[in-house]
Amino acid sequence: MNQKIKVLDLEFTELICAEDIQRRIAEMALEITARFQNERPIILGVLNGVIRFAADLIANLDFELEIEFVKVASYHGGLHSSTLKPLIGISPEIVSNRPIIILEDIIDTGNTIRYLLDSLSQMQCKSIFISTLVCKPDKFLHDFPIDQIGFSIPDRFVIGYGLDYEGLARNLNSIYQLKS
Ligand code: IMP
Ligand code: MG
C-alpha cells in the first residue's frame, strides 16, 4: 500500500519512491557524462526546488564542471503558478561561451524555463541543455525541447525531494502526489 503523509491541510500519497529517484538520477548522470565529460559545462540549477536533484546528480558526475544557481519566483509555495520575477540572476561573464545544463526540479507550464531561456539568449552560451527531474507534459505551454526528463507525471500537484507545499516537504526523500 502507498505511504500517506499530511502537510498542513493536505493529504498526499507516495508517487515515486526514493530508490526509483536515485536509480533514475544515476541513469541521467550517465547520459550527461557521455555528452559533456570533455566540455566543462556549467550546471545552472533553478532554486529552491532543485537542491536535492542537483546534489544527487552531481554526486554521480565525475568530470570537470561548475555549478551556478538562479532563483526565479513563480509558485510562491502554493498550488498554482503565478507571475515570474528574478531573485538571483545570471552573470553574462560566467555563462558566455560555455555549455549550460539547466537543471529543474519540475517543469509544469514551462514558464520558468522559457523566462530563463529568454534571459540567456543575449549571453552567447555555447549550448543549452535542459534537464528536469519531473515533467507534467499535460500542463506544458511552450515548444522548446526538453532534453532530459527523469519522470513524466500526470497533472497533479506533487511534493517531496525538493518540491514544496507552502515551503514545506522539500526534505522528504520520495515524491508524493496530492490525494484526489
Ligand atoms: P513552471 O514555470 O510552471 O514550469 O513551474 C516551475 C516551478 O513551479 C517549478 O520549478 C516548481 O518550483 C514549481 N512547481 C511546479 N509544479 C509543482 C508541483 O507540482 N509541486 C511543487 N512545485 C511545483
Ligand atoms: Mg523549481
Image: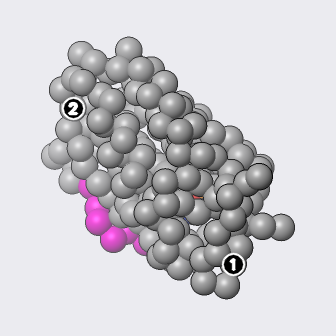
For label 1, the crowd category at 10 Å Cα-Cα, with few meaning under 14, some 14 to 19 and many 20 or more, is few
- Residue 76 coordinates in the image, percent (x, y): 51, 77
Viewer can see residue 139: no
**Which residue is rendered at x = 29% and y = 61% of the image?**
89
Residue 114 on the magenta span: no
Which residue has dot 1 on it?
10
Q: Tell me the residue at 32%/46% (across/down).
A: 55
Q: Is residue 13 above or below residue 45?
A: below
Quarter of the image where one finds residue 177:
bottom right
- Tag nearer the camera, 2 or 1: 1
Vertical order, 70 against 73 (above or below): above
Q: Residue at x 78, y 67 (%)?
A: 179
Quarter of image, res 41 = top left
> Where residue 9 sits: x, y (%)?
67, 84
Q: Position of residue 65 (x, y in %)?
A: 21, 32
The residue to which callout 2 is attached is: 65
* Type of amino acid at the residue the image marks with label 2: Leu
Majority secondary structure of the magenta segment?
strand
Residue 84 appears at what percent x and percent y? 49, 70
What range of the chain is rendered magenta?
85-90
Residue 11 seen anywhere in this rendered image of the structure: yes
